[in-house]
Amino acid sequence: MMPSGRTYQVVFVAGGVVALLALGWWWLIFSKVVENDYLTVGQAVTCIVDASDLCALAQALCTNDHLYGIRWYAPEAFWAAAAVLVAGVLLSARPSRA
């Protein structure tokens, strides 16, 4: 079964939504980390894509004043979003069959 012509749009939009959610989740955690001077903004940005020891330490130092008590971020969310976005791009590049 071949995907319809609009499948790539759905996949691309889904990837965009997941990316926005991942970035929002990251900001929820690391805005407090930066605010408390555990990391600089530049250091915190690296935590979007990598679970380094520095990122783990900064998250461990977080207090419970986060929304809903969420104190950790998983960079796998960003990579999942990137994979879905790439899938959308690849699907859009496929020639459609009539």
Image (tube, grey):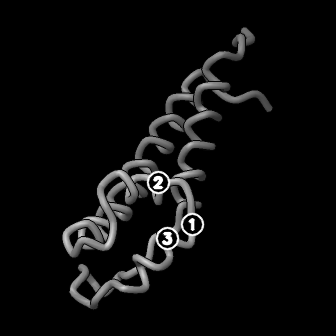
Q: Earlier in the sequence, mark 1 or mark 2?
A: 2
> Which x, y percent locates residue 26?
38, 62
Residue 93, how many percent across, how many down? 65, 16
Find residue 8 and report its image quarter: top right
Quadrant for the C terminus, please.
top right
Indicate which label's residue lies in the foreground, 3 or 2: 3
Element at label 2: helix
Cβ–Cβ under 8 Å for marks 3 and 2: yes
Residue at the location (41% across, 78% down)?
59
Q: Is residue 45 left or right of residue 95?
A: left
- The answer to whether the residues at label 1 and label 2 have Cβ atoms under 8 Å apart is yes
* Residue at image point 33% right, 84% down: 62
The secondary structure type at the circle numbered 3 is helix
Amino acid of disc 1: Ser
Estimate the x, y position of residue 6 in percent, counting from the top left.
54, 26
Which disc, if any, is residue 52? 1
- Spatial separation of the CA atoms under disc 3 and disc 2: 10 Å
User: Which amino acid is tagged 2?
Assistant: Thr
Outermost residue toward the right in this view: 1
Cα distance in 3D space between marks 1 and 2: 9 Å
Q: Residue at x 53, y 59 (%)?
A: 77
Quarter the N terminus occupies: top right
Q: Residue 83 carries which label?
A: none
Q: Badge 2: few (under 14), some or many (20 or more) residues near its Cα, within 10 Å?
A: some
57 or 89, which lies in front?
Answer: 57
List the residue tagged with mark 2: 46
Q: Label 3 vs label 1: CA separation? A: 5 Å
Mark 1 lies on a secondary structure that is loop
- Name which residue type carries label 3: Leu
Between 48 and 12, the one nearer to me in the picture: 48
